[in-house]
Image (spheres, helix red, strand yellow):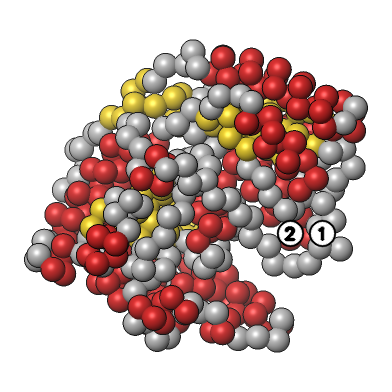
Amino acid sequence: MFITAKAQEAEATESEENIIMKLMGYKRENGRYGIRNHLLIIPASVCSSETAVNIAKLVDGAIAIPHQHGCCEIGDDFDTTKRTLVGFGKNPNVGAVLVVGLGCEGIQAKDIADEIKTTGKPVEYIVIQEEGGTAKTVSKGVEIAGKMAREISKQNKVEFDISEIILGLECGGSDPTSGLASNPSIGVASDMLVSMGGSSILSETTEVIGAEHLLYPRFEDENEGKKFLEMVKRVENRSIAAGHDLREGQPTPGNKAGGLTTIEEKSLGCMHKAGHSPFKGTLEYAEELPTNKKGLYFMDTPGQDIDSITGMVAGGAQVIVFSTGRGTPTGSPIAPVIKITGNSSTYNNMIDNIDINAGKIITEGVKLQDLGQELFDKIVDVCNGEMPKAEALGHREFGIFRTGFTY
């Protein structure tokens, strides 16, 4: 079973084995490469979110990620929130970080800063209760962040190999054209990146239910394959434990209006984003992808697009490709999000938000491989600095996945 996956990898890489593609980006202290150079202001909790936003407003180029978490969380939710915040700070698209805490929250600003510091990038933290209130904290934060902004502005881009790229794969607001055109196009582009030594992350556990038997044999490591199946089962069991069937929300009303009738039908279209490459392993939500074992991974994320993208970016993805049949404006604070649709009507209706029309496969007879190449070329251009529409319009949606309660 698992030998077949290796055979698929050999076949996929045969035509690309001698290709080397160089990009331009920012080399980080730990040897990774960013395609953007953001100054990130991280609130340790909801209590410091507004202060972090106010600091970011006063420093050119700074980005804050306000959220509702960080205090009175326990267990998996505590770990997930902290891992996500740390992961955002570690992402190579970030050049420097300022963490803002209140002082009495569950997740401490110093703890977040200390973990991000392992990358070697500039990191500092401030605490509202120690600075004498929010006004003084904003003043001190602007002083620190302003200096950071000036320093990272001096950094020049350098050449690096495309094998350093981690691509996040997302879909949302799906319709039948997603499985017919846009998701298969993403699969082609993902296979191209993996064949060049790069990495991709397939996300959304709820959207592989009904297709898990087709993805499982593609895991090179049988233990990782079993872990993948356990992740799928865990999602089902979590819903049952809450007294609900997750099919109450999947497919979504928009999916149904678009023509998808069951979760299995939706999943059979979603899985095409993963192309034909073998899976190297599985990742928990916001878990960092191993840099010494590149390739295709599965990450346990929810079907909620923003939370899912957040998890992949926290795991190290520098760029996201997002397939949408119905249309969506979603972006990310620190990673460019490229939109593709398989529905030409959606493309024309939301042309301000969608970058590529894969509907040409259906309406104009464009070959899948050619559309996949078009998407891959767009990924390269974005990695080299071109802004996709979500980034140009300032879409910076951010949400952290949670499974429990606040106590």
Disc 1 on helix, strand or loop? loop
Q: Amino acid at mark 1?
A: Ile
Mark 2, other Cα within 10 Å: few <14 / some 14–19 / many ≥20: many
Residue at 63 percent across and 31 percent down: it is: 56
User: Which residue is rendered at x = 82% and y = 32% of the image?
Assistant: 134
Percent across and percent down for residue 230 are: 58, 73
The quadrant of the image that shows the C terminus is bottom right
* Residue ID for mark 1: 74
Above or below residue 397? Residue 143 is: above
The answer to which quarter of the image holds residue 94 is top right
Say which of 231 and 397 sits in front. 397
- Which residue lies at the image location 53% right of the left edge and 42% below the top edge? 333
Residues marked 1 and 2 touching at CB (< 8 Å): yes
Q: Which mark is residue 77?
A: 2
Callout 2 amino acid: Asp
Identify the image quadrant of residue 180. bottom left
Q: Position of residue 369 (x, y in %)?
A: 16, 57
